[in-house]
Image: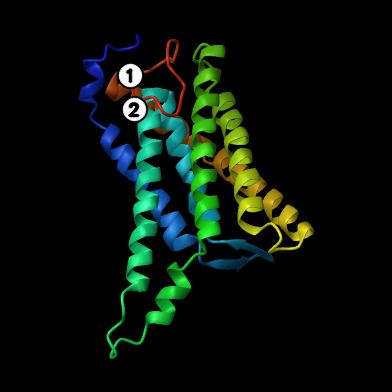
Amino acid sequence: METPTPETTQNFKYFDLIMVSFVTLLLCANLIGAPKVCHLWGLTFGGTLIFFPITYLFGDVLTEVYGYKKSRKVVWAGFGALIFACFVSRIMIALPPDPSWNHQEALKTVFDSTPRIVAASLVAYLVGEFSNSFVLAKLKILTKGKWLWTRVVGSTIIGEAVDSIIFYPLAFYRIWPTELLAEVMVTSYLFKVIWETLMMPITYRLVDFLKKHEKQDYFDYKTNFSPFSFEE
């Protein structure tokens, strides 16, 4: 399957759906999952760990099928959506509540994350997602498009490691004890990698479906990998 010309890349049937799904998962994982602390089977973990790794699955699919350049736009779309969601939450909390509305404190509890945690989350997301896409695109060229599992697992190992190494120290250093910070960081990282590895059959089916119906299997031979380039 040949790399399509720029004209044909504008007629994808499912790209917009994948992009919307990615951004929706990202927002839900951060806004709904992040405030929840769960305890299951003797383990305590943040609710975001259940759904956030799926965003990496979508990132893998986007890069594998459509290429790094298309994936780059989706990463920036997700980043913009997160910033806007943070802005909206700050405005909603700042607006004075009606005296008859008694849920201001509950709203603050759920959505009033500290600027430090918000900043750590944004930086970790941006660097982690771009690292994930870059590694997958390069591994696809190295493996000549074979052995999808090697680049899915390899990109996840790198991307999730970068995400965890950036987020937890930026968000919780000198707030949590050093031992707890290291334990949570390592546990969360392993959980994310294992979770996406278990999702491998779904990744394979989704990639095969999209390549077949989009008639697209992009190789980033001449791609400018700068995160700040938006060239086609």
Quarter the N terminus occupies: top left
- Percent of width and height locating residue 126: 48, 40
Q: Are marks 1 and 2 in contact (CB under 8 Å)?
A: yes
Q: How is the image coloured?
A: rainbow
Q: Is residue 123 at all visible to an observer of this figure? A: yes
Q: Amino acid at mark 1?
A: Gln
SS for dot 1: loop
Residue depicted at 48% across the width and 52% down the height: 51
Q: Is residue 22 visible?
A: no
In the foreground, 3 or 181: 181
**Quadrant assignment, res 207:** top left
Extreme-bottom residue of the structure: 100
Q: What numbered label is drawn on residue 176?
A: none
Q: Mark 1 or mark 2: name the one nearer the start of the chain.
A: 2
Q: Crowding near pointer 2: few (<14 within 10 Å), some, many (20+)?
A: many
x, y percent for residue 196: 55, 41
The residue carrying mark 2 is 210
Q: Amino acid at mark 2?
A: Leu
Q: Secondary structure at mark 2?
A: helix
Distance between mark 1 and mark 2 Cα atoms: 8 Å
In front: 147, or 142? 142
**Residue indicated by mark 1:** 216
Is 62 placed above or below 96 here?
above
**Label 1 packing within 10 angstroms: few (<14), some (14-19), many (20+):** many
Which residue corresponds to the image point at 41% horizontal and 37% vertical from the top-left?
A: 75
Q: Residue at x 49, y 65 (%)?
A: 113
Q: Where residue 110 sits: x, y (%)?
A: 45, 70
Q: Is residue 226 above or below residue 91?
A: above
Q: Position of residue 77 (x, y in %)?
A: 34, 40
Tell me the quadrant of the picture where the C terminus can be found: top left
Quarter-wise, where is residue 195 in the image?
top right
